[in-house]
Amino acid sequence: MQSSSWQSSLLALPFARTGESLARHTTIRAGGLALVWVEPQNEAELVAFLELNQTVGAPLYVLGSGSNVVPTNEGWDGALLHLGKGFDFSRVEESVLIAGSAAFLPKLTRFALDNQLGNFEWACGIPGSVGGSVWGNAGARGFNGKGFEGRDSAADFAGCVAFDRRGVRHELGRGDVEFAYRRSSLGELIVTEARFSLKPLSVEQARVHKDGVRQLLEVRGRTQPANAASAGCIWKNPKVEGCVGAGALVEQCGLKGRHCGAALVSEVHANFIVNAGGATATQIRELARYVEEEVEDQTGIKLEREARFW
Ligand SMILES: Cc1cc2nc3c(=O)[nH]c(=O)nc-3n(C[C@H](O)[C@H](O)[C@H](O)COP(=O)(O)OP(=O)(O)OC[C@H]3O[C@@H](n4cnc5c(N)ncnc54)[C@H](O)[C@@H]3O)c2cc1C
C-alpha cells in the first residue's frame, strides 16, 4: 500500500496525528518528523490501531521515552507508536510492583521506596520508560542496603503484558522471557505493563535505601553528562579480555571532545555522544561511525552499539 493511503487510514484514528518532531521525543533532541504518530491511551485503542495496521501495513516502530534511540534526519516514514499517559500507572500488590509501560523509571524508584520496596534503586537515574527498560533489559549500579552492585530489569522481572502486531494480548510469566546483556527475547512484542517482585523493607531500611539513591544520583551527576542531551551509552562494553569498558576505550583512543557540528563525544564520559545544541541526527550518526572506525584502527576492537540507531 502506498504511504499516502495508509497515512490517511491511520490518521482517521482519533489518537493519531502527523508531523510530530522526533527531536521533541528523544533525549538526544534530534531527528526529523514521524509521518504518523499514534498515541493510544488504553489497551482498546492500542488494539484498534494494531488491527487497522494489519490491514493497511504501515512500517511500525515503538518509541518509549526515546532515551536510547538515535533517529535519522529523514524521521520515520511510517507509524510511530508511543503509549500515552493512560499507560503511566503504578501500584503495589504485596511485594510486587506493577507498572504501566509509560511509567518513568526514576519516578518508579521513588514510588517503590515510598511503598517500602527495595531492589529497584538501579533505575533511579535512567530516563527511560518501563516498556523500553524491559524490552532492552536496562541496568545499572543499584543499592542493596549495604553497598552498590549491578542490577537490571531482568533481576526482579515477574512477568508482563504484551501485544503482538496483530493486536493479540499475551500475559507472559517470568519464564516466558529470556534476558541477556541489554537484550530480551521480546522482539516485536509491544509491552504494556510489567511486574517486578521486589524486596520488602522496614521504614528504617527504606530510609537507608533512599540515602543510597541520593548517592547513586550524585555519582551519576559527576561521572556522566546527565544533564546534557544524549541517548545514554552509545556502545556496549566489549567482551574483550583486559578491556575496561567502551567509554575508557574511546577515551584511550584520544576521542573525547571530538565533534561533528554540535554532536560531541562527551568530555565527562566518552561512551556518550551529546547534542551540544542543534546537532542533526546525521551529525550524531557520522560521529558514531567515525569513533567506531578510529577505535577499530587503533585497537582492532569492533564496538557494538547499545543505543538503537534507526
Ligand atoms: C542520561 C542517560 C543515562 C542512561 N543510563 C542508562 C543506564 O545506566 N543503563 C541503561 O541500561 N540504560 C541507560 N540509558 C538508556 C535508556 O534510558 C534505557 O535503555 C531505557 O530503558 C530506554 O527506555 P526508553 O523508554 O527511553 O526506550 P526508547 O529509547 O524509546 O526505546 C528503546 C528500545 O526499546 C523499544 N521499546 C520502547 N518501549 C517499548 C515497549 N513498550 N514495548 C516494546 N518495545 C519498546 C524501542 O522500540 C527501542 O528499540 C541512559 C540514557 C540516558 C539519556
Image: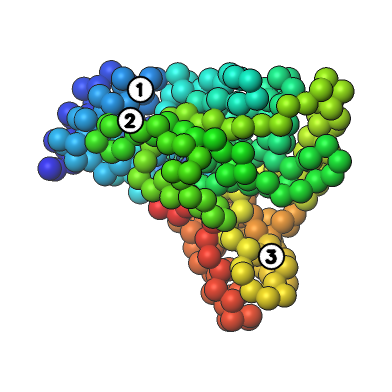
Determine whether the residue tagged by mark 2 lies in a helix, strand or loop.
strand
Residue type pointed to by label 2: Arg
| Residue indicated by mark 2 | 169
Q: Earlier in the sequence, mark 1 or mark 3?
A: 1
Q: Nearer the viewer, mark 2 or mark 1?
A: 2
Q: How far from the left and from the top, in percent, is residue 121?
A: 72, 36
Q: Which residue occupies 61% across, 69% down?
A: 239
Is residue 299 or residue 25 the one in the foreground?
299
Give me the C-alpha separation between circle 2 and circle 1. Answer: 9 Å
Mark 2 nearby-residue class (10 Å; few <14, some 14–19, many ≥20):
some
| Residue indicated by mark 3 | 245
Q: How far from the left and from the top, in percent, is residue 39?
A: 37, 26
Q: How many marks?
A: 3
Q: Are marks 1 and 3 in contact (CB under 8 Å)?
A: no
Q: Is residue 58 visible?
A: yes
Q: Is residue 28 visible?
A: no
Residue type pointed to by label 3: Gly
| Residue indicated by mark 1 | 43
Q: Which residue occupies 35% across, 49% down?
A: 74
Q: Which residue occupies 63% across, 20% down?
A: 94
In the rendered image, which quarter is residue 126 located in? top right
Q: Nearer the viewer, mark 1 or mark 3?
A: 1
Determine whether the residue tagged by mark 3 lies in a helix, strand or loop.
loop
Q: Are marks 2 and 1 in contact (CB under 8 Å)?
A: yes
